[in-house]
Image (cartoon, grey):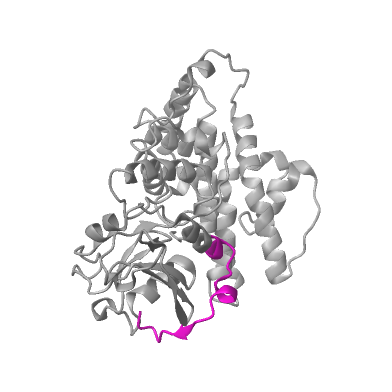
Amino acid sequence: MHMRIYSIDSAYNPWTKLTQIVQRKEADGFDEERPEVPMLFRDVPSLLIIFVLTMPQPLRKERFICVIKMLFNLQFTQALAALSTKLSSEERQAWVTSGILKKSARNSEKSFEALLSHVISELSKDKSVYKVNREETTMPSSSVWSPQSIEFSLQQFCLPFFRLSCLLQHHLYGDNLTGCLEEEEFSTLAVCLGLLPSAPQPPSAVHSASCLEWPCNAFDLVIQWCEEVTGLSHMLPEQSLSLLVHDPQWAAPRLLRLPDNYNIIFQYYHRKACTACKKVPKDPALCLVCGAFVCLKGVCCKHQGTCECVLHSQHCGAATGIFLLINASVIIIIRGHRFCLWGSVYLDAHGEEDRDLRRGKPLFLCEERYQVLEQQWVSHTFDHINKRWGPHYNGL
């Protein structure tokens, strides 16, 4: 479930904070690739839109429902993780103890008690995850987390995803949107999306975990998602899982942060082996969106007649790619079946480019040019601003 769509991944708060730390590390040495955003930090409604827009069209309804079911598993696990940050350490321990018995029971993969216990146990393996401020520890908590209040909180967390899913289903397939009472909204939408066979009576009897439908062992999948979070603790020493529910900060998408001196990039990459073919590329290139190192025009990395840069542009940017050619200091743009040379963002002391590095002059980053490139990428204006386009015939 991995997609590099910059407008989602780079916007969410944990990614913003993580990027800031990576940038500080780049001051000592050029960092080649951004770490992945943990699944528990992804925005699930946004993932749904991405999948619907990128899957083959027309999208059959059974495939749409399958996507809904799989994404709800992630949304529900996020709800459990976010909820666990609101519990005191004593409450977390109590839920872990009570959930252990539920895990051995039948149908435990559809029990929020068993799953909550499992999430807390996995995230607690790193002590920094549930770290709280001293001010917060001195404040008495007035919340009493009963099974009923937890169920209500889980439903409220998942409702925005349900609403968007029903609206998309109505738009794509013409399904009716029926009104309902506020207390019946979760069960009504779950039935509409095929997550429940029928609405339980009374509506308060609905259990959100009964909508889960895991494609594999639920507890193994939760372990994987939690390990992605605990694996970031060394990079986010002052943060915790409370980033899921506190201090939301939205940042505009942006390209890689490049070093001021081009020599740092050249020395790092000009003899570096390609991650795919394990050979040193004749024409190495760096993706400025995700930091991937690829072969330009490399026959060694061709797949079904398509070279690596074109393949990467399809995977990374939905057929839009921005690559820095290491041996030429030039940026190349790929848009679908076309490409163009954008120019260079590295200039000499006189403000001139040194294409193909023939003059051997020291080159330094021109922040103004890089901002223009970034703005064209963010605003999707490459087609309107750059005129010298040509076909690449899948040969880049």
- Is residue 325 visible to the viewer in this orientation of the structure? yes
Residue at the extreme front = 350
Residue 165 vertical placement versus 138 (above, below) = below
Residue 15 vertical placement versus 197 (above, below) = above
Judging depth in this view, the residue of 207 and 292 nearest the camera is 292
Residue 62 location, x and y as percent?
Answer: 58, 69
Residue 133 location, x and y as percent?
Answer: 48, 21
Q: Is residue 8 left or right of residue 269?
A: right
Quarter residue 235 falls in: top left
Q: Is residue 391 magenta?
A: yes
Q: Quadrant of the C terminus?
A: bottom left
Residue 175 location, x and y as percent?
Answer: 73, 66
Residue 273 vertical placement versus 283 (above, below) = above
- Is residue 66 visible to the viewer in this orientation of the structure? no
Q: Is residue 283 left or right of residue 225?
A: left
The residue positioned 51% from the left and 60% from the top of the image is: 374
In the image, which residues are magenta? 375-396
